């Protein structure tokens, strides 16, 4: 299981390297890799294509809020141009999204869901739509996976 997390980390590390802003007038954003699992009220994996209520990964869009401006993430020279990676490995209990987050990030899922993700204390706390979903002081895992109920 550690091997698969290592692969995810290495792949997303390339994102960090290629994630320089094209506008030279503003500072580069500080990004942090975080992982999310999405389930329904019954605990069914909403990222797994075998689920009839799957959240469509191909419609997901990521936006960074930088100096009060919402900027869509598109890195054409990256292997994951939207800074989102989906991992449905058999080594994991459910599918996981790896997302490179800025201090304030908006994740659009499809055309009807828009969620705000905020990092606090240098990424040690994750708030998802205002609710704390992960706190490093209460979680001993090296690679946190916040579970979001939709």
Image (spheres, rainbow, N blue to C red):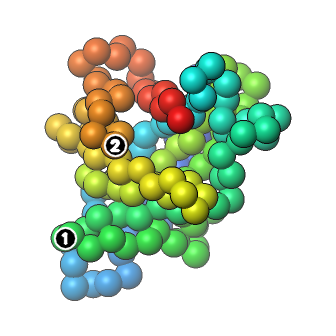
Give the image location of residue 128, x and y in percent.
Answer: 35, 40
Say which of 40 and 37 sits in front. Answer: 40
Give the image location of residue 56, x and y in percent.
Answer: 68, 52
- Left/right placement of residue 29 relative to residue 61 reads left
| Disc ID at residue 103 | none
Say which of 73 and 117 sits in front. Answer: 117
Indicate whether 57 appears above or below 2.
below
Mark 1, residue position:
67
- Residue 3 visible at all: no
Residue shown at the point (48%, 48%) measured from the top left: 99
Residue shown at the point (20%, 40%) measured from the top left: 120
Indicate whether 112 appears above or below 44.
below
Q: Quadrant of residue 79?
A: bottom right
Mark 2, residue position:
129
- Left/right placement of residue 78 relative to residue 104 reads right
Kindly report the distance in space between the C-alpha atoms of the residues bearing marks 1 and 2. Answer: 19 Å
Indicate whether 70 appears above or below 126.
below
């Amino acid at each position: 299981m550690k091997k698969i997390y290592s692969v995810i980390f290495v792949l997303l590390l390339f994102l960090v390297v290629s994630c320089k802003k094209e506008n030279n007038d503003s500072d580069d954003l500080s990004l942090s890799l975080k992982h999310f699992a999405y389930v329904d009220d019954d605990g069914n994996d909403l990222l797994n294509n075998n689920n009839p209520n799957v959240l469509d990964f191909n419609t997901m869009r990521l936006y960074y809020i930088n100096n009060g401006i919402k900027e869509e993430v598109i890195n054409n020279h990256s292997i994951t141009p939207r800074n989102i990676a989906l991992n449905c490995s058999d080594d994991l209990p459910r599918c996981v999204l790896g997302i490179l987050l800025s201090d304030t990030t908006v994740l659009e899922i499809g055309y009807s869901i828009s969620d705000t993700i905020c990092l606090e204390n240098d990424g040690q706390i994750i708030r998802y739509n205002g609710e704390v979903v992960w706190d490093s002081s209460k979680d001993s895992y090296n690679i946190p996976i916040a579970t979001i109920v939709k």
